[in-house]
Amino acid sequence: MLLAALVAHLVGDFVLQSAWMAEEKTRRWWPAVVHGAVYALPFLFLTHSVPALVVIAGTHVVLDRYRAARFLVWARNQVAPAAWRPSWADVRDNHGSPSSVSPGLALALVIVADNTVHLLINATALERLG
């Protein structure tokens, strides 16, 4: 089931997401909602549980709309001595990472964090509600 959930996530988040959705989902709710609905389609092969599908799609919409993973990246950097802890103002333009982190690495870190959170939510929803 976990492998199938991973494949459903990858198809929904990368194969079925159009450029319009990817570019606009953090600016406006409508593209985020459309992306969330399309993202949930592959999960219909794994469950017909409406609550599980609502959790999978709904959390995906909110997390992507607010680019929530960048807050997770910032928060993990708070586990350091005070001199190493970046303020939000220092990281907001670099995907939650300090400016000393290259933009490419910062983007990779936020993508990994984002996908990890989605996968954890999806697995939990399928196990508990599916």
Image (spheres, rainbow, N blue to C red):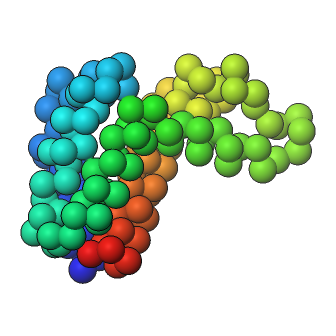
**Quadrant of the frame with the N terminus:** bottom left
Rendered position, 114 above or below 68: below
- Could you tell me if residue 115 is visible in this image? yes
Query: What residue is rendered at 61% in x and 33% in y?
Result: 97
Q: Is residue 129 left or right of residue 44?
A: right
- Could you tell me if residue 108 is visible in this image? no
Rendered position, 100 above or below 72: above
Query: What residue is rendered at 64% in x and 26% in y?
Result: 91
**Quadrant of the frame with the C terminus:** bottom left
- Toward which corner of the image does residue 55 lie, by quadrant? bottom left
Residue 71: x, y in percent? Answer: 59, 38
Rendered position, 104 above or below 41: above
The residue positioned farthest toward the front in the image shown: 50
Residue 34: x, y in percent? Answer: 19, 35
Q: Is residue 21 left or right of residue 66?
A: left
In depth, the one of 40 and 12 nearer the eye is 40
Query: What residue is rendered at 89% in x and 39% in y?
Result: 82
Residue 43: x, y in percent? Answer: 17, 63
Residue 64: x, y in percent? Answer: 38, 38
In depth, the one of 68 and 28 nearer the eye is 28
Rendered position, 25 above or below 3: above
Q: How many marks?
A: 0
Q: Is residue 66 left or right of residue 17?
A: right
- Toward which corner of the image does residue 84 lie, by quadrant? top right
In depth, the one of 113 and 61 nearer the eye is 61
Q: Is residue 83 left or right of residue 28?
A: right
